[in-house]
Image: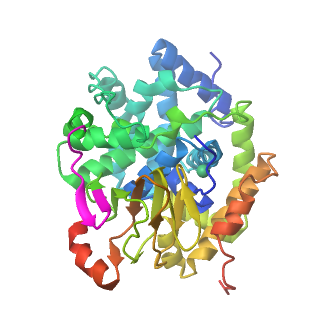
Amino acid sequence: MTDTRHHPSEATLMAFAAGALDEGLALVVSCHLVSCPACRALVAEGEMIGGALLDSSQPAPLADDALSRMMARLDEPEPPPPPATDGNAPAWMPAPLARQMNALHGPSWAAQARRSLGWRWLAPGVRQLSVMRRTRGGGTARLLSIAPGTTLPHHDHGGLELTCVLDGAFHDERALYQTGDVAELEPDTPHQPVAEGNHPCLCLIANEQPTRFSGLVGRLTQPLIGF
Amino acid sequence: MSQPDPAGDAGSDWSALLVAVGQRRDRAAFARLFAHFGPRLKSYLMRLGAQPNQAEDVVQEAMLMVWRKAHLFDPQRAEAATWLFTIARNRRIDLLRRDGRGGPAASLPWEDNLPDPVDETPLPDERLDQTRQAEQVRRAIATLPPEQAQVVHLSFFQEMAHGAIADHLDVPLGTVKSRLRLAMKRIRQGLGKDTFGKDTLAEETLPDPPPTGA
Ligand SMILES: [Zn+2]
């Protein structure tokens, strides 16, 4: 994997480590971490902060029977591990996303995906695939496949938006994003991604809150996004 | 096995106990870990908004995970409290997700879906002396300027992402991000890492916050 040049902000990595990031955003971060040792190190430092805060917490006494209840549970049978991916996941798909697809569609999703992953038309040149039910925080995560040269509808969003490029590249008003890169967009920052190169750009996009598409095409396509 | 000093909280002993649980299924060692970390986890969970009996239940669930996963604990990679924190964090999120969906817990194989840096994170230059590093992190946290300590505490104790923190404190998002970034920088410096590998990126993606009276 080439060196990534665009990373989630330190604030986002800290929120990830704290467990404060909405589930879809956390999935995007974890897909980036697979290929970014620098961000993994920052997350590990955030977790050390968590450990330090845990260890310095004022102890709250447990119920009298807590220890006996606990010890009695140690011999409970372990639930079977979730089935592993069956090896049919596309090469571009990072492991955290493949596990998420497993959870959503069952372990044979990848074999079925050879026929159809369930991509839906979103706009000319743009298809999408939902990879997560709506999260606790009301956010979403989905894959977009953007044909070369295609411009996504102009959109802004009420919450944080994170995009990880899984294959290909895109640019927006700010920068060029290539495989492994993360674009972090603050709330209410309109942007208009355009796919680069000569094969489709595959992106994993997560929002804290539903995205609002602006403009005619945006208004027409918004209901199709299904969020 | 050395006796952990209840007052001194010697981290290496907790790590040794975790290793004993992982390698020998040592129940006495586990009971000691439970006695130390159980009440701290409960306190932590209650600060996150759990009711006392909910917190007790999550403590039980998290410590059961500790028992089952202790063989994965590597004292070279993480200090005991840090590792326990990640296990508890993941277990708590897992349980919250299930509640939110209303489905029976067993039907959702979330466990391995959690972004789990514990299992996947190699720490190339951080393998030495996790206990000493954890001590340095504690010291650095204790000396953070109040406005940085505040955003760290809101992240970890209120489960707020930076947008929510900005709303809560009524300061611009850029200010929150900048405070979190500075807090991480100080903690890195506390670990003896003066170089901040992503400075150029940070400047690029984090515009200077507007002046604020907050
Ligand atoms: Zn990175």
Q: Position of residue B159 (x, y in %)?
A: 46, 60
Judge left or right: residue A18 versus residue B13.
Answer: left
In the rendered image, the vertical position of residue A139 relative to residue B93, given as above or below: below
Instruction: Report the magenta residues as a range.
Output: A114-128
Q: Is residue A94 visible?
A: yes
Q: Quadrant of the C terminus of chain B?
A: bottom right
Q: Position of residue B157 (x, y in %)?
A: 50, 59
- Rendered residue at 46%/38% (across/down): B87
Q: Is residue A60 visible?
A: no
Q: Position of residue A7 (x, y in %)?
A: 59, 56
Task: Name the one closer to the observer, A126 or A102.
Answer: A126
Total labels drawn: 0
In the rendered image, the vertical position of residue B8 relative to residue A118, given as above or below: above
Q: Quadrant of the N terminus of chain B?
A: top right
In the rendered image, the vertical position of residue A160 relative to residue A156, given as above or below: above
Judge left or right: residue A132 versus residue B30.
Answer: left
Classify residue A173 by image quadrant.
Answer: bottom right
Task: Name the one closer to the observer, B51 or A84.
Answer: A84
Classify residue B60 by image quadrant.
Answer: top left
Magenta-colored stretch includes residue A124: yes
- Rendered residue at 59%/62% (across/down): A11
Task: Name the one closer to the observer, B40 or A217.
Answer: A217
Magenta-colored stretch includes residue B117: no
Q: Position of residue B88 (x, y in %)?
A: 44, 42
